Amino acid sequence: MTTVEQAEKLVLAEVKDFGTEPISFEQASGRALAEDIKADRDLPPLALKALDSHGGVDARAVIRELIRSPVQFAGLCALAVDSRAAFRALKRCRSLLPGLFLGLGAADL
C-alpha cells in the first residue's frame, strides 16, 4: 500500500510550473489565479440579512434594516447595479456553457 508521503512525492514529481502572466480580469475565466482577487467594497450588512433560507429576498427584512440604518441605501443601490451587470454577463455566457444553467429559464437571468 502506498503511504501518504509516497503518494505526495509521486504527485509532486509530475507537477509542472507554467509560470505566471499578467492578464485582465476579463481574461481570467477558466484559469488558476496566482493571487486572491479582493472586492473593492463590502456587501451592505442588510444584503445578508435580507436573504431567506431559499435564497429569495425578504422585502420586510430589507425595509427593517433600511429604517434601522438608512446609510446602507447607497450600498444597496451599488449592489443592485452590480447584480444587474452580473446577470447580464451570465445571460451572454449561457450559450457558451451548456448544462451549467439547467433549470434556469430566461426569466431567471
Image: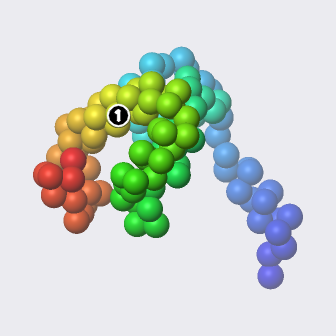
Whether residue 19 sits left or right of residue 92 in the image: it is right
At label 1, counting other C-alpha atoms closer than 10 Å, the crowd grade (few under 14, some 14-19, many 20 or more) is few
Q: Quadrant of residue 8?
A: bottom right
Q: Which of 27 and 72 is in front in this view?
A: 72
The answer to whether residue 43 is visible is no
> Is residue 47 placed above or below 39 in the rendered structure?
below
Q: Quadrant of residue 37?
A: top right
The outermost residue toward the left is 106
The outermost residue toward the front is 67
Residue at 48% from the left image edge and 47% from the top image edge: 64
Q: Position of residue 49 (x, y in %)?
A: 52, 52
Colour scheme in use: rainbow
> Is residue 18 placed above or below 99 in the rendered structure?
above
Residue at 73% from the left image edge and 50% from the top image edge: 13
Residue at 82% from the left image edge and 69% from the top image edge: 4
Q: Where is residue 2 in the image (x, y as percent from the top left)?
A: 80, 75
Whether residue 103 sits left or right of residue 37 in the image: it is left
In the rendered image, the quadrant that contains the N terminus is bottom right
Q: Which of 91 and 54 is in front in this view?
A: 54
Q: Position of residue 31 (x, y in %)?
A: 48, 37
Q: Which of 64 and 3 is in front in this view?
A: 64
Secondary-structure class at tag 1? helix
Residue at 84% from the left image edge and 73% from the top image edge: 3
Whether residue 19 sits left or right of residue 96 in the image: it is right
Please state which amino acid type lies under the numbered disc 1. Ala
The answer to whether residue 71 is visible is yes
Q: Which residue carries the number 1 mark?
A: 80
Q: Position of residue 18 (x, y in %)?
A: 59, 32
Q: Quadrant of residue 60?
A: bottom left
> Is residue 45 placed above or below 5 in the rendered structure?
above
The outermost residue toward the bottom is 1
| Count of labels in the image | 1
